[in-house]
Image: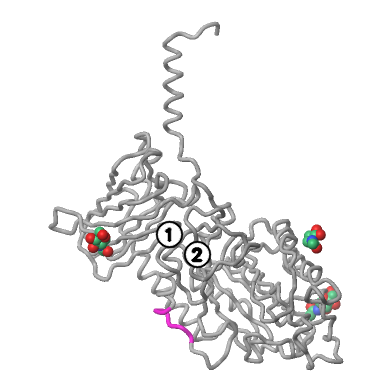
Amino acid sequence: MKYISCLQVAALLWSANTAVAQNGPLPYLRVPDQRQLDWQRQELYAFLHFGPNTFTGEEWGRSQSLPDIFNPTTLDTDQWAKTLADAGMEGMILTAKHHDGMCLWNTSTTTYKVANSAWAKGRVGLDADIVRMAAGSAKKYGMKFGVYLSPWDIHRDPAMPKPGLQGTIYDEPQIFGDSSPGDYNTLYTQQLTELVTMQLADGTPIDLFEVWLDGASGSDTVQTFNWTGFREVIRAHQPSAVMWGHQGPDARWVGNEDGFTVPTNWNTISRTQDDAHYSGEELERGVRDGLYWTPAESDARIRDGWFYHADEPSKSGTALMDMYLKTVGRGVNLLLDVPPDTRGLIADVDAANLMEFARLRKATLSRNLVTPDLKTSSSSVRAGDSDEYGPGKVIDGREDTYWTMDDDKLTGWVEMELDNVYPVDGFIVQEHIALGQRIGGYGIDAMANGDTEYRVLVNGTSMGYKRIDLLETAVETSRIRLRVTQANAVPLIQGVQVLGSRR
Ligand SMILES: *[C@@H]1O[C@H](CO)[C@@H](O)[C@H](O)[C@H]1NC(C)=O
Ligand SMILES: *[C@@H]1O[C@H](CO)[C@@H](O)[C@H](O)[C@H]1NC(C)=O
Ligand SMILES: *[C@@H]1O[C@H](CO)[C@@H](O)[C@H](O)[C@H]1NC(C)=O
């Protein structure tokens, strides 16, 4: 082609313009990695604290017991995974080693492991590696699997005398601490390496979805950990695993262990795991427009302690539901501790409460009145392109589509017409966080049956991955409106569910 006609130039310019106008919104400041996004969608999973403390009644055992203390009478890791899967949990994280240092897998780094117990020796022809067994059971029941490996190790800490181990093969070098001879970082790195490269009995690799790097220490011994090295080992072998720590790097502590966070919650913070620690309140809230995408995880318990103690009550389904609404309902993952008992089973009462919790979630939240064919409208649509960005995208049930507007619009609304008048008593709204967290204020309104004006039902602040708002009393309505009242960049609404009863 030698020349381009004016008409062709105009057509080219026109299509170039359209292409620009139809471009999707750019990421806003920090955005999640794919692993963080996948993890966020897990929402609810279990913590399994199991080890010598289960049998001594302690929470922080002081490495005084011989491995024979570990003696579950009817251990069945399948029962753990099946119980948790039946209760709608997405994964489980096991304490491969708690502060007492006794390893639940058959490690080559220490003699202090359950593999040296009479229990393990009695399992002739059967597996005695609890981590491998639990990982196999998780896989069998479609659950994700993760590990907790305590950095603080009393078994190696000279500040913690261990008279009970003296003169046994378990009396090992006290290498924990910068001023102790030997390098604890090398030992910890070896333990971590064994865990992140572990295979199931049939040789298939074990995929970890989370590695829990606890910051707790109850000793004055100063040990400088090689965190950079630990993280490299995890990333190299388990690139999909989210690393949990006080301030990340991938997921942060929510600032308390009671199963709640404050109503306003940001997925970003402005300190790394290696910086000075935020207070609990700062961790609960996070930092708007912070420097790092480090969403919160709430670690909470079904009982009072982390380990099983027979005399402790188990929380009811209603109490667990309340926790869920104040964590998952505020965009924070819930890691609920369900400790196996001295039989090596999840206690019947805990299992029953988990099932009631699951029933309540379903009864409350699986009542979406919105179907993809409903009529929707909005204050505006990005580039007028309803196929890409229209209000219908909030009800299509997809995670990769959203309603949005032109970049200069920071507030706006989307409205939907239900196929009938229903008693509406709750909402689930989701921001498309794959492109960052933008929204700092939203409202949900209904035009009640017979009314001609909207009435405000919900005033929210940060939206984020998911918000669940339940009403005290149901409203008879067929028209719902979501308003974005504050955003720092054009808001992207991924989903709106309207909860209520179909008669
Ligand atoms: C632990 O591993 C060692 C070395 O491979 C092996 O000899 C031993 O039988 C294993 N113990 C258990 C309980 O599986
Ligand atoms: C930390 O661990 C990494 C990886 O194991 C290693 O290369 C590095 O030398 C260690 N750093 C220190 C200060 O020991
Ligand atoms: C929401 O905020 C508005 C304006 O501040 C107020 O009038 C209304 O009562 C609030 N509604 C609810 C349900 O909190």
- First in sequence, mark 1 or 2: give its number: 2
**Is 107 positioned to the left or the right of 218 in the image?**
right
The three-letter amino acid code for the residue at tag 2 is: Glu
Residue 502 visible within the image = no
Q: Furthest residue to the top?
A: 2
The three-letter amino acid code for the residue at tag 1 is: Lys
Label annotation for residue 466: 1
Mark 2 nearby-residue class (10 Å; few <14, some 14–19, many ≥20)? many
Which residue is more in the foreground, 176 or 238? Answer: 176
SS state under label 1: loop
Does residue 175 sit above or below 438 in this rendering? below
Label annotation for residue 43: 2
Taking the image as four quarters, which one is ligand 2 found in? bottom right
Mark 1 nearby-residue class (10 Å; few <14, some 14–19, many ≥20)? many
Asked which quadrant contains residue 498, the reply is bottom left
Quadrant containing the N terminus in the rendered view: top right
Residue 476 locus on image (x, y percent)? 20, 62
Name the residue rendered at 37%, 57% in the picture.
429
Name the residue rendered at 73%, 86% in the picture.
63
Q: Do the residues labelled 1 and 2 touch (CB within 8 Å)?
A: yes
CA distance for labels 1 and 2 = 10 Å
Quadrant containing the C terminus in the rendered view: bottom left
Name the residue rendered at 31%, 63% in the picture.
499
Which residue is more in the foreground, 123 or 476? Answer: 476
Q: What stretch is highlighted in magenta?
A: 314-319
Label annotation for residue 250: none
Asked which quadrant contains residue 200, the reply is bottom right
